[in-house]
Amino acid sequence: MANDRIKNKFGQLSKEGRAGLITFLTAGDPDMSTGQNLLNSLPKSGADLIELGIPFSDPMADGPVIQASSQRALKSGITLNKILYMVLQFRTFDNTTPIILMGYYNPIYRYGAQKFFDDARKAGVDGLIIVDLPVEEDELLELSKSKEIDLIYLIAPTTDERRLPIITRQASGFLYYVSMTGITGTRSADRMEVEEAFPIMRQYTELPIAVGFGIKTAKQAKEIAMFADAVVVGSALVSIIEKNLEGINSKVDKKRLCNSVLKQVSNLSKAIKAAPKSRNVGQSV
Amino acid sequence: MTKNNSLQQGPDERGHFGIYGGRYVAETLMPVILEVEKAYRGAKNEESFNNELTYFLKHYVGRPSPLYYAKRLSESLGGAKIYFKREDLNHTGAHKINNCIGQILLARQMGKSRIIAETGAGMHGVATATVCALFDLPCTIYMGSSDIERQSPNVSRMELLGAKIVPVTSGSATLKDAMNEALRDWVTNVRETYYLIGTVAGPHPFPEMVRDFQAVIGLEVREQIKELEGRLPDTLVACIGGGSNAMGLFHPFLDENQINIIAVEASGSGIDTGLHAASLTAGEPGILHGNRTYLLQDDHGQVAEAHSISAGLDYPGVGPEHAWLKDSGRVEYVSVTDSEALEAFKLTSALEGIIPALEPAHAVAHVQKIAGGLSPEHLLVLNMCGRGDKDMDTVNRFVET
């Protein structure tokens, strides 16, 4: 049976005539059980798709917020195996919300690519974003096709029209437009610049296009949702975890932490749902 | 001419040395990396670029560097005839400047207006700050805060030369972390910035390009040893962190199978203590900083912190061409500890009047182990890749503790 949660989700969003909310949290942040609780509660708070970060010791494309969350998660003992188990747990009650693992190549390479794709497929992972695996390094392409786990590629403001078709040809699931040159969670996206990039990208692909890096507030999310197919919010959510961690250790406080994160997810979701659609091009699914 | 089966013709057009190398970087950086590659391919065959490079290497760096017969050390070890390739006599005191001259000329040709670099021991930082002063380009150097502390003379030099030093406190606060921060800077300021990588690592074309700029070391040795001894050397020895001085010496000799080639890694407190920087001796293949290579890492692919008394060798990875040469068996990779390097540091100072950097002191330490077993006709060339003034604080502290 084809693994088509991503396709179905974007199809449904298209019918609803709105953009989707993609939330990013680092797996196992701030600890394993809180991380699982957060993951489990994301869909009912309004996350349409879920990105789960695979923590890495050397996150070269990430800003201070995600760097710190990766360190917390690694300290809590998270491993790729445990992340797949988290997804498996999630799948026991949710079989429609797409889960995309996002991270760097080394943990997957070390796990063994073949074994990883097998296990990820079984766990219910739908897509992968490997930040340091550009289209030129296409060694996972065959596995991605045979195991029906989408390889989701990034398009950057520096990507020119010569590279664009090379990326869109290899991509599956959706495309992820990086809204600015830089690391995660530092600058804010320039709405005008991002919007201008869309007609060019749409010429080369019928896949949905999400926008991420640099979207912090509900207001920004709403603006981007007017023309994008999905909006990714990561560092802004992770920083809520960070803020709530100061001096806490009780279960009650962890619950409050989850509630603060989920409340912001729901704010973002409401903002995105309220965004008027200015685009007349959309995904063709 | 290199033959079809030559070990000198790598990497392939995608930057792979066997399974190693490649371009494992974020999409934001891919276009600029392709731009660097294209510019380098052009420059490499351009007469004007090569003339300019030769001019600065001769009149500014002071090349060729001498090939010096270390008579007292040879006699004291009682075996091989040991030559030092005196890269420590280059302007700025190490081999790093060879690469910096090449890359700064390229950056200028590409119209880049800002230079960034990472540094461990500070020698690459000093060399980068130097060429930036020479060509009037603003320069930012990322350096781990641990390294800033143990290589403070180099920090002052870089500041005097006009560079902005950014201390890096994440991770182990050494070279690996400095490289992470430099990459984050590059991805943010990609359009105007040139990242002047200091070793034969990073995404393609850096391993190949840095090797080519450093190959002047081996090419000179070929000529010099023929003039002095009438033949090629029998053994080459160099220390290896990222591996640029070693690659520079070795590369022109890779196809001469009769020549023993030995690279010396830093085993810190000892391989079995886990506190070392010997990625080829004790690491596993993985992906970091844009290339696949041997890495110190745990079972889950998290990169480990390296440990070495020498800041220049304190890196958990190594250039991808070395990874490939290890697997092929062409180069022998060995390691020596902090204490052994320190002994060699003192011995070289006392016998030759040359205070070596702690990095090549590792190479001397290995030569101490093997020289006695070799005949007096055996010609051994050691790359004395840097001078040790910068290390006096570290050495004094180590002796005290």
Image (cartoon, rainbow, N blue to C red):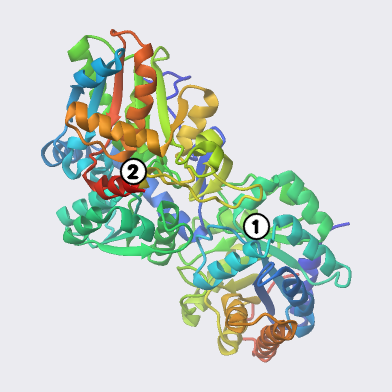
Q: In this view of the protein, which residue sits in the foreground, B351 or B65?
A: B351
Q: Is residue A175 above or below residue B396?
A: below
Q: Position of residue B195 (x, y in %)?
A: 35, 55
Give neighbour class at mark 1: few <14, some 14-19, many 20+ (Cα, 10 Å). Answer: many
Secondary structure under the numbered disc 1 in the rendered image: loop
The amino acid at mark 1 is Ala
Q: Position of residue A119 (x, y in %)?
A: 79, 52
Q: Quadrant of residue B95?
A: top left
Q: Quadrant of residue A11?
A: bottom right
Q: Residue at x 32, y 53 (%)?
A: B150
Which quadrant is the N terminus of chain B positioned in? top left
- Read off the residue under disc 2: B40
Q: Position of residue B77 (x, y in %)?
A: 30, 17
Residue lying furthest front: B400
- Would residue A200 be found to the left or right of residue B397 on screen? right
Q: Position of residue B126 (x, y in %)?
A: 24, 51
Residue lying furthest left: B59
Q: Is residue B43 above or below residue A222?
A: above
**Label 1: chain letter:** A
Q: Is residue B234 above or below residue B281?
A: above
Q: Residue at x 40, y 12 (%)?
A: B258
Q: Is residue B191 visible?
A: no
Q: CA distance from mark 2 to mark 1?
A: 30 Å
Give neighbour class at mark 2: few <14, some 14-19, many 20+ (Cα, 10 Å). Answer: many
Q: Residue at x 47, y 80 (%)?
A: A190
Secondary structure under the numbered disc 2 in the rendered image: helix
**Label 2: chain letter:** B
- Read off the residue under disc 1: A171
Q: In this view of the protein, which residue sits in the foreground, B21 or B235?
A: B235
Q: In this view of the protein, which residue sits in the foreground, A65 or B321?
A: A65
The amino acid at mark 2 is Tyr
